[in-house]
Image (cartoon, helix red, strand yellow):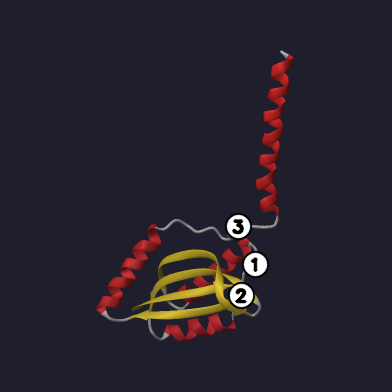
Amino acid sequence: MRHYENLVIVKPTFTAEEIQASVKAIEEVITSNGGEIAATNAMGMRKLAYPIDKNERGYYHVIYYSTAPAAIAEIERRFRINEDLLRFVTIKYDTNREIKAWNELVVKANKAPEAPVKEETPTEEAPVVAEAPAKQEAPATEAPATEAPAE
């Protein structure tokens, strides 16, 4: 069995539950073809280098696994017909040096905390919320000033 890494980019228009279901389906494709998943790394929502199918962002997920070389053709075929995926790339780790690097990546991925599914993006409301406390503090400082002379 050889060591592989798959980076998949899932469409950003899905909800958190739909993204997790899509990732589980991707992992199922690997395990159903005789692969053993060593680690996964959910990288979260990120900006793409260029738009893909009019999408500016995508949910990145990396899967480290071992499988027979003959199974890769079927795994990639199933990835190509999966409409939930914007892109995918399969990387083979073949030499001893590459396998050592793969083992280090697996250890690192197992130690990394789970990334959030959706990343909070600043909206137009965020500056309004930031200004609101400043406006509330001004009347609060005026109120004690008027109460102090009244005593």
Q: Is residue 5 above or below residue 43?
A: below
The spot of residue 89 in percent (x, y) is: 47, 80
In which image quadrant can residue 41 be found?
bottom left
Task: Give the residue type at disc 1.
Answer: Phe
Seen at 49% across and 65% down, the residue is 43
* Residue beneath disc 3: 120
* Residue beneath disc 1: 14
46 horizontally vs 3: left or right: right
* Residue beneath disc 2: 84
In the image, which is nearer the foreground, mark 1 or mark 3? 3
Farthest-out residue, left: 96
Check the picture and name the quadrant holding the N terminus.
Answer: bottom left
Q: Earlier in the sequence, mark 3 or mark 2?
A: 2
The spot of residue 19 in percent (x, y) is: 59, 66
State if disc 2 and disc 1 touch (CB < 8 Å).
yes
Task: Give the residue type at disc 2.
Answer: Asp
In the image, which is nearer the foreground, mark 3 or mark 2? 3
Depth check: give the residue in front, 84 or 47: 47
Q: Earlier in the sequence, mark 1 or mark 3?
A: 1
Q: Distance between the Cα atoms at labels 1 and 2?
A: 9 Å
How crowded is the residue under tag 1: few (<14 C-alpha within 10 Å), some, or many (20+)? some
Depth check: give the residue in front, 52 or 41: 52
Q: Secondary structure at mark 1?
A: loop
Q: Secondary structure at mark 3?
A: loop
85 horizontally vs 103: left or right: right
Q: Earlier in the sequence, mark 1 or mark 2?
A: 1
Q: Distance between the Cα atoms at labels 1 and 3?
A: 15 Å
Q: Secondary structure at mark 2?
A: loop
Seen at 72% across and 32% down, the residue is 139
The spot of residue 108 in percent (x, y) is: 36, 62
